[in-house]
Amino acid sequence: MDFEDVDDVIGVAAELKDASADKLTLEELQEVAGDLDIPAEYVAPAVAELERRRRAKAQAERASRARRNKLLLWAASILGAALVAVLMVQAGLSRALAEVDAHRAHVLNALDRVESTERHYADAPSGDRDARAEIDGAHNRVRVARQRYDEHAAAYNGRAASFPGRFVAPLFDLPTSVPLSAEVTR
């Protein structure tokens, strides 16, 4: 034994001695039982039963902790899955809204082109076929742009109004609906 360990060994020995001072031997327990008119042969089985009960209690506590941990893990998994689902819905709504915004810009550009084309051909004679074709083409582009916008706006509105979109959109400050092309203004 190293001289450095002597203090540690003496310290542990003193702890063990103090701990044993608070304990009774089997013989001492039997004497106490005899003082209480309990036959000595019941003491050893009582000690064994007490140890069995303590082991059972400790095992039950471990099982309870394991069940609680399993429940917590299950709950965390459910919450994690719900969070992923919410984020996926939010991402889908955001993509759909970006499509709506892009098509809204197409509608506005087509409307600007109609105005520009009509101004350009304002002085053209009423029978000018080229002018009429340009103006009709510009109006046709507006019609097509509005139709595409309305398709995307309706798709977004459907997603935002359905479950779980109707709960997710407000959480992420997304509109619960967007206007159709008839309501689109500059």
Image (cartoon, grey):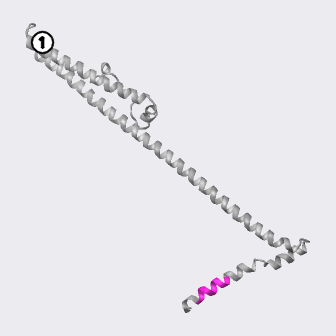
In the rendered image, the vertical position of residue 73 relative to residue 157, given as above or below: below
Q: Left or right of 69: which side holds 57?
A: right
Q: Is residue 75 left or right of residue 153?
A: right
Residue 27 spot, x, y in % from top left: 82, 79
At a point 67% along the width and 63% down the height, the residue shown is: 58
Residue 176 in percent (x, y) is at: 41, 29
Residue 78 position within the rendered picture, expressed as x and y whole percent measured from the top left: 50, 45
Quadrant of the frame with the N terminus = bottom right
Whether residue 94 is situated above or below residue 41 in the rendered picture: above
Quadrant location of residue 7? bottom right
* Residue placed most toward the observer, 125 or 8: 8
- What is the secondary structure assignment of the residue under circle 1? helix
Prevailing SS of the magenta stretch: helix
Q: Quadrant of residue 85?
A: top left
Instruction: Give the residue displayed 31% in from the left and 18% down from the top.
Output: 182
Region in magenta: 6-14
Q: Decide whether residue 10 is among the magenta residues.
A: yes
Residue 165, horizontal then vertical, whole percent = 43, 33
Q: Nearer the viewer, residue 3 or 173?
A: 3
In the current view of this chain or complex, which residue is farthest to the right? 37
**Looking at the picture, which amino acid does disc 1 mark?**
Arg
Residue drawn at x 36%, y 38% is 91
Q: Is residue 50 above or below residue 67?
A: below
The answer to which quarter of the image holds residue 162 is top left
The C terminus - image quarter: top left
State yes or no: residue 32 in magenta.
no
Q: Nearer the viewer, residue 62 or 143?
A: 62
Q: Which residue is mark 1?
A: 132
